[in-house]
């Protein structure tokens, strides 16, 4: 059942896992934010990532978005996520297997997680940066 709310919001009753609610509550408390705001942000990010992880629909769109637009919406979070996983020693496969010769736009293999994260952002920008 859905109820129209002000500000373009809609109230929907959905079933969520207890652990996911606990995670959202912990984040809201840690960052002194309203739980509803945290859940909205998490839901928005999750729908974008979920759309990107599925093949496009019959119209070529990923949910509501064309591929390029979805990539643009994902990029800020994606860069932060790659930096996060690298900081904790989890190197994405696309960065782990480097060619023996590096393109001029990339640096030689990095030694520290921060260097690897910086290189990851450069690589992502090769594919996802808005055209100049």
Image (spheres, rainbow, N blue to C red):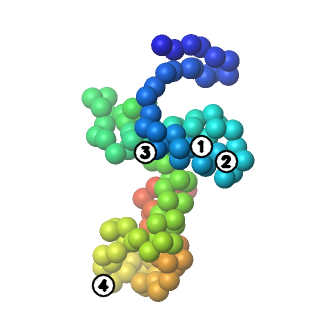
Tell me how far mark 4 sits from mark 1, CA to CA.
46 Å
Q: Is residue 18 above or below residue 129?
A: above
CA distance for labels 1 and 3: 21 Å
**SS assignment at label 3:** helix
> Mark 1 or mark 3, which has the lower sequence index?
1
**Quadrant in which the C terminus is drawn:** bottom right
Which label lies toward us, 2 or 4?
2
Quarter of the view holding residue 8:
top right
Closer to us: 69 or 15: 15
Is any atom of residue 69 visible in this view?
Answer: no
Which tag is nearer the camera, tag 2 or tag 3? 2
Neighbor class of circle 2 (other Cα within 10 Å; few <14, some 14-19, many 20+) is: few
Residue 87 x %, y %? 51, 72
Determine the secondary structure under disc 4.
loop
Q: Is residue 5 above or below residue 52?
A: above
In this rendering, the answer to whether 37 lies above or below 73 is above
CA separation in Å, label 2 and label 3:
24 Å
Is disc 2 in contact with disc 1, using a CB cutoff of under 8 Å?
yes
- Residue drawn at (33%, 78%) of the image: 98
Which of pointers 2 and 4 lies earlier in the amino acid sequence?
2
Reading the image, the residue beneath label 4 is: 100
Image position of 22 (left or right of 103): right
Identify the residue at image location x=57%, y=20%.
10
Q: Position of residue 99 (x, y in %)?
A: 30, 79
Residue 19, placed above or below residue 8: below
- Measuring 53% from the left and 53% from the top, which residue is drawn there? 77
Using the numbered discs, state the Cα–Cα distance from disc 3 to disc 4 in whole angstroms: 32 Å
Residue in view at x 36 percent, y 34 percent: 61
Label 2, on which residue? 29
Say which element carries label 1. helix
């Amino acid at each position: 059942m859905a109820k129209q709310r002000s500000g373009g919001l809609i109230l929907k009753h959905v079933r969520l896992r207890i652990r996911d609610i606990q995670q959202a509550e912990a984040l809201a408390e840690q960052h002194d934010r309203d739980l509803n705001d945290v859940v909205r942000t998490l839901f928005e990010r999750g729908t974008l990532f979920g759309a990107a992880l599925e093949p496009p629909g019959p119209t070529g769109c990923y949910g509501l978005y064309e591929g390029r637009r979805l990539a643009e919406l994902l990029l800020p979070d994606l860069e932060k996520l790659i930096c996060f996983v690298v900081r904790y020693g989890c190197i994405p496969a696309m960065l782990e297997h480097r060619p023996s010769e590096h393109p001029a736009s990339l640096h030689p293999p990095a030694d520290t997680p921060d260097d690897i994260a910086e290189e990851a952002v450069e690589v992502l920008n090769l594919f996802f940066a808005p055209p100049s």
